[in-house]
Amino acid sequence: MPVVEIENLTKDYEVGFWRKRKVRALDGLTLSVEGGEIFGFLGANGAGKTTTLKLLMRLIYPTAGRARILGRDINDVQMHARIGYLPENPYFYDYLTARELLSYFAELFGYSRTERKRVAAEVLSRVHLDEKSWDKQLRKYSKGMLQRVGLAQALVNDPEIVFLDEPMSGLDPIGRREVRDLIASLRARGTTVFMCSHILSDIEVLCDRVAILNRGRLSETGTLEELRQRAGEDRRIEIMVAGTTAEKLSSVSPALDSAQITPNASGARIEVADERDVDAALAALRIAGGRLVSVQPVRQSLEELFVREVADNQGETWKK
Ligand SMILES: Nc1ncnc2c1ncn2[C@@H]1O[C@H](COP(=O)(O)OP(=O)(O)O)[C@@H](O)[C@H]1O
Ligand SMILES: [Mg+2]
């Protein structure tokens, strides 16, 4: 059963001071998210991801369209108590400590005084915030630490579904890994995750299904595998070899005609059209007297698809 159903959601922002005009940030978005999945909402900066989440959270109002979460209209206040939300740039009253802030959120969700303490400690450890900083004021926190506090805040009510806007932003590689593991652990608990990102690799390792948003319009949706297939060129295989040269390889085997052979520091990279050509390449390698280093599918195509989808995005750079 879908837990998020979005239908024709549209948002125009009014911009300009003297001469007001409307800018369409989201244009007829229709999609649904199934219970228990990690859904990735991907798009370049300015694509409309944050706008979508703000509409779902009822922070702004749609120009047209509607949406349901957990089977309830998004105007249903009680439904909002069952979901969690991490804003893009979480901002908190920074004279509070992390423990105080989380206790406060727990209080808002109706936990008793003793439960608040337990809940605050539990979510702060779940987001791997170092216990030594729990009683420090948030103004002394780094961006990465605040991001964790934001995540803890989103989990305080043990939500059935969480909406995360760029959850990895501001984190170093270790922090990104921890947040990835945390998101994966949410799935293990049965929590549905709807996450926005402009970073393909974060989406690629975590998400069951993705939607790509381009300038306010949905351009692709499906599982990663489906998108890869749609992107085509997926069957190519890369064979890395050492102890021989690209020239030797090309001279020994006419069977390698269709393959692309590129020299590199330790040997060569052979790219074949599909699995059936791997044997020929290995045979050639044996004759040329080299060693096999690795054989793996070329994973380029998904990235190519994303780049193609957002290529006309007004010079916005696509960060990997
Ligand atoms: N409050 C606002 N007023 C006017 N334009 C806005 C406002 N918020 C966002 N926009 C515009 O709407 C578009 C989508 O923005 P946003 O939803 O923040 O994209 P994303 O989160 O994908 O980077 C952008 O062109 C942005 O400039
Ligand atoms: Mg955004």
Image: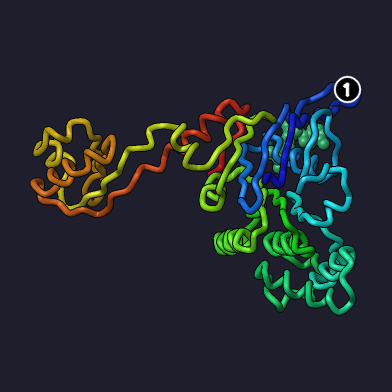
On screen, residue 312 versus residue 84, left or right, reads: left
Q: What residue did someone put label 1 on?
A: 20
What is the x, y in percent for residue 265? 25, 49
Q: Nearer the viewer, residue 56 or 20?
A: 56
- The mark tally for this picture is 1
Q: Residue furthest right?
A: 18
Q: Is residue 287 left or right of residue 138?
A: left
Q: Amino acid at mark 1?
A: Lys
Q: Position of residue 298 (x, y in %)?
A: 36, 42
Callout 1: few (<14), some (14-19), or many (20+) C-alpha neighbours within 10 Å?
Answer: few
Q: Secondary structure at mark 1?
A: loop
Ligand 2 shows up in the quarter that is: top right
| Horizontal and vertical percent position of residue 309 | 55, 30
**CB of residue at label 1: within 8 Å of ligand 1?**
no
Q: Kindly identify the residue that appears in the image at 75 percent across and 43 percent down.
A: 53
Residue 19: name its quadrant.
Answer: top right
User: In front here: 190 or 296?
Assistant: 190
Residue 175 in view of the camera: no
Residue 41's image quarter?
A: top right
Residue at 69% in and 73% down:
125
Query: In this orientation, which residue lies closer to the viewer: 317 or 195?
Result: 195
Residue at the (61%, 51%) spot, across then down: 38
